[in-house]
Structures are given as C-alpha cells and as structure tokens.
Amino acid sequence: MRMKSRICQDAQKIEQFLLKADTGFLGLALNNEPYIVPLNYVWFEGSVYLHGASEGKKVNFIKENKNATFVISKSEGTMVSPIPAETDTAYLSIMLFGEIQIVNDLREATKAMQALLDKYVTGYYNSPLSLKHVERYRSSLGSTTCIFKLRPNEITAKENIIINDQLYYPGRNVSTE
C-alpha cells in the first residue's frame, strides 16, 4: 500500500466492518475482461460467502479463473480545507484477495445461507433453513441457487479517520471559516 499512514491494522475494527457492512463488490477477470458486481455477502467462519444464480457471467468467469477480489468500503464524509488540494474523504475500505469457489457441500451451503438470513433479516424466520429448501430452491427464471466462498489469503485495510471540525456540510463555505 502506497500510503503507509493509512494502513489499518486494527483486527477488531476490520472484523466488525466485515461483519456489518451491507454490500461488497466482487471483482473477477477473464481474458483481459474485468467484471465487478455488487453483492450482499456474509463474513462467516473466516470466509466471504455470496449467493446467486448457478448460471451466468459470474459463474462463467469463476469456472475459468478462480482469482478474485472482494471490496467493501464506507465513506464517513468529506473533510474540507481552505487549501483545495487538502480536501479529503474520511473512509474505511477493506480488500480481500484469494480464490473463489462454488460450494458443493449442501451442509456448508445451507449454513452459509442461514448466516446470510441471520445477517439481513435477523429473527424474521421461526426456524432454521432446511437442507431440502436450499437443495430444491429455484429462482423465478428457473435457475438453482449457487453459493460462492472466497477464503482470503490476503486482507488489506485502509482508513482515513474523520476529523469532525473539518467535516463538510451544506452551507459550509470557505469564506465563513
């Protein structure tokens, strides 16, 4: 990472962000063609789990090239300065690198789907997912659900900590500073 001062090595902060962020961006590539797709995900047992259709561009890319990147980020706002070049954004971003695979084990796939439900609709269902539900589910287009797993071999995190008195808000103006 070029800006060493922005490296975040706070393992607890990284873990909490991975657990709570809503959307991540999966980056794949095939034959010099990049493909990035936003997805719901769950950080579960040291891996990122995703779900989607069992056919389509994402699956085609994964079958040909298992190398993947998964990125989550959060902007905390823009910080201003009377010097335009010093205007900056407060943020936290995490990049995970590794190989992505299709989960073929029905028990693991069901546990991952349950973890996704627990994350996004906590307490909504009265009973846990059954293996049969995951095995038999078909989308409105007729495809089965596919669970993907990215176990990272590298995780990097970068942050620019917010400075509250520099935070921009509508109506703030350099001539009133």
Image (tube, grey):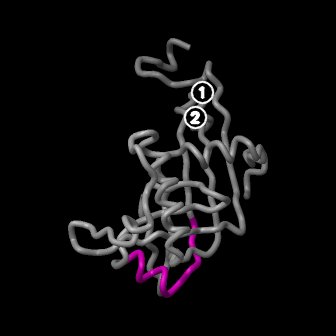
| Label 1 crowd (10 A; few <14 / some 14-19 / many >=20) | some
Secondary structure of the residue carrying tag 1 is loop
Q: Position of residue 120 (x, y in %)?
A: 44, 45
**Could you tell me which residue is drawn at 59 percent across and 77 percent down?**
67
Please provide the residue range marked out in magenta.
57-69
The answer to whether 42 appears left or right of 60 in the picture is right
Q: Which amino acid type corresponds to the residue marked 2 in the rendered image?
A: Thr
**Could you tell me which residue is drawn at 41 percent across and 21 percent down?**
170
Q: Which amino acid type corresponds to the residue marked 1 in the rendered image?
A: Ser
The quarter of the displayed image where residue 66 is located: bottom right
| Label 2 crowd (10 A; few <14 / some 14-19 / many >=20) | some
Label 1 near label 2: C-beta < 8 Å?
Answer: yes
**Could you tell me which residue is drawn at 58 percent across and 61 percent down?**
48
Mark closer to the chain start, 2 or 1: 1
Residue where numbered disc 2 is placed = 87
**Could you tell me which residue is drawn at 48 percent across and 53 percent down?**
116
| Closer to us: 112 or 176 | 112
Disc number placed over residue 81 in the picture, else none: 1
